[in-house]
Image (cartoon, helix red, strand yellow):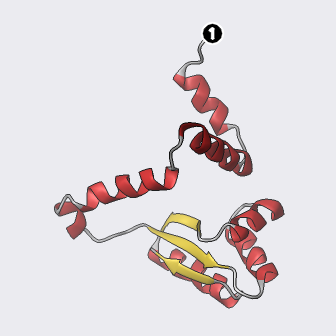
Amino acid sequence: MALSKAEILDAIASLTVLELSELIKDLEEKFGVSAAAAAVAVAAAPAAGGAAAAEEKTEFDVILLSAGDNKVNVIKAVRELTSLGLKEAKDLVDGAPKAVKEAVSKADADAAAKKLEEAGAKAEVK
C-alpha cells in the first residue's frame, strides 16, 4: 500500500528536530543529493528576478559560524534563543556553521547574533 503525500507530510510534522535532521541525512545519502545545494539554487532564483532584488529584505537568518573557545556558554545561548533541548543545541553548535534563527526581523537577528558573540561564538546575520 502506497502512502499518500498528506500521510507523509503528517509523519514528518510529528518528528522532533533531531529526528528530522537524521531523516534529511539519510535521504541525502540514499539519493546522493544535498539539501544545502538545493536551498542555494532556490535562493538564487528570486535574486535574479531584478524587481525582487530591489526590494528591501525584511527577514534575516542568524548563522552560527563557530563556537569559539567557550562552547558551553554558546550552547546555553543557543538554548535561550531557541526551543531546543540540550542535546539538540549541542548538535547544532557542533555542526556549525548552521542557522540558529531563521526568518526573523533585523532587530531580533542582531540581538541574537550579539548574544551568541557575547557567549564567545562567531555569528553572522544574513
Secondary structure beneath dot 1 equals loop
Q: How many other residues sit within 10 Å of disc 1, few (<14), some (14-19) or many (≥20)?
A: few
Q: Residue at x 64, y 38 (%)?
A: 13
Residue 75 x %, y %: 76, 74
Pick whichever, 86 or 106, lies toward us.
86
- Snapshot quadrant of residue 31: top right
Q: Amino acid at mark 1?
A: Met
Q: Quadrant of residue 44?
A: bottom left
Quarter of the image that includes the C terminus: bottom left
Counting labels gives 1
Rendered residue at 70%/47% (across/down): 22
In the displayed structure, does residue 51 sit left or right of residue 56? left
Q: Residue furthest top?
A: 1
Residue 6 sits above or below residue 48 on the image: above
Left or right relative to 29: residue 50 = left
Q: Eyeballing the image, is 119 above or below 4?
A: below
Residue on which disc 1 sits: 1
Residue 57: where, in percent of width, then height?
34, 70
Q: Is residue 54 left or right of residue 67?
A: left
* Front in this rendered view, residue 62 or 19: 19
Residue at 73% x, 51% y: name it.
Answer: 18
For the N terminus, give its image quadrant: top right
User: Looking at the rendering, which quadrant does residue 97 occupy?
Assistant: bottom right
